[in-house]
Amino acid sequence: KAGVTQTPRYLIKTRGQQVTLSCSPISGHRSVSWYQQTPGQGLQFLFEYFSETQRNKGNFPGRFSGRQFSNSRSEMNVSTLELGDSALYLCASSLAILAGGSTDTQYFGPGTRLTVL
Amino acid sequence: AQTVTQSQPEMSVQEAETVTLSCTYDTSESDYYLFWYKQPPSRQMILVIRQEAYKQQNATENRFSVNFQKAAKSFSLKISDSQLGDAAMYFCAYRSPINTGTASKLTFGTGTRLQVTL
């Protein structure tokens, strides 16, 4: 089975621009979560999508948004980029089994490295 | 809110030796899941091992095993017969039970960088 894929792998943008990152989950996985990784703040949860609905959200400003399509692919958008948005953005997918008994493990993609100049 | 603490920023181990990485967490929940992820220089986050809090038996995956002490809220990772390919950043992570409002969120520790020497 193919793993989680993220595109693009690298991005360079300037302050004030906006950016869209894409994530394709493992086939059959219905939940997609996004994380931001920086040297200063570590790994922080951005949001999670399930069945095209945002189910959970971390503590990030409204400039960070996302969506999920009917095929479970997800996109993340950051508007009005700031220098502090430079980070590795990781996407993770899981089966999202809601019945009891599953650990619902998250499997990660290779990440998108965003540099804001 | 749950917190995860990894107090060892860096560890070093000789090839073929055993090393233990520490992780403690704080939670008021009685049921939860714990994970160790490995992040090599490629930055791909790879699942190493997982533990369900309701299981008393410690999880093992080949050379990797955990020491889960629920009362002490401790979740250490033991790597036996260390190999050069084990060199990476290791993250401990906590997840609430499914069907709770925060179920989908992983809370990570700050990581331990493991060096493997010849």
Image: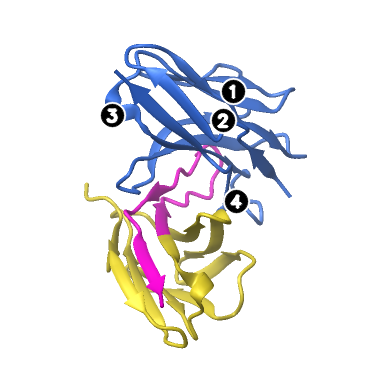
The residue shown at (47%, 75%) is A66
Mark linked to residue B103:
4
Along the polypeptide, which appears first: circle 2 or circle 4? 2
- Between A68 and B81, the one nearer to me in the picture: B81
- Chain assignment, label 4: B
**What's the CA distance linking mark 2 and mark 1?**
6 Å
Query: Among the chains, which one is blue?
Result: B
Circles 3 and 4 on the same subunit: yes
Helix, strand or loop at label 1? It is: loop
Disc 2: CA contacts within 10 A as few (<14), some (14-19) or many (>=20) = many
Identify the residue position indicated by label 3 in the image. Answer: B85
- Chain assignment, label 2: B
Within the image, what quadrant is residue A113 found in?
bottom left
Please state which amino acid type lies under the numbered disc 2: Glu
Residue contact at pointers 4 and 1, CB within 8 angstroms: no
Picture coordinates of residue A75, whole percent (x, y): 38, 73
Disc 3: CA contacts within 10 A as few (<14), some (14-19) or many (>=20) = few
Helix, strand or loop at label 2? It is: strand
Please state which amino acid type lies under the numbered disc 4: Ala
Identify the residue position indicated by label 2 in the image. Answer: B52
Query: Was residue A93 drawn as part of the magenta stretch in this picture?
Result: yes
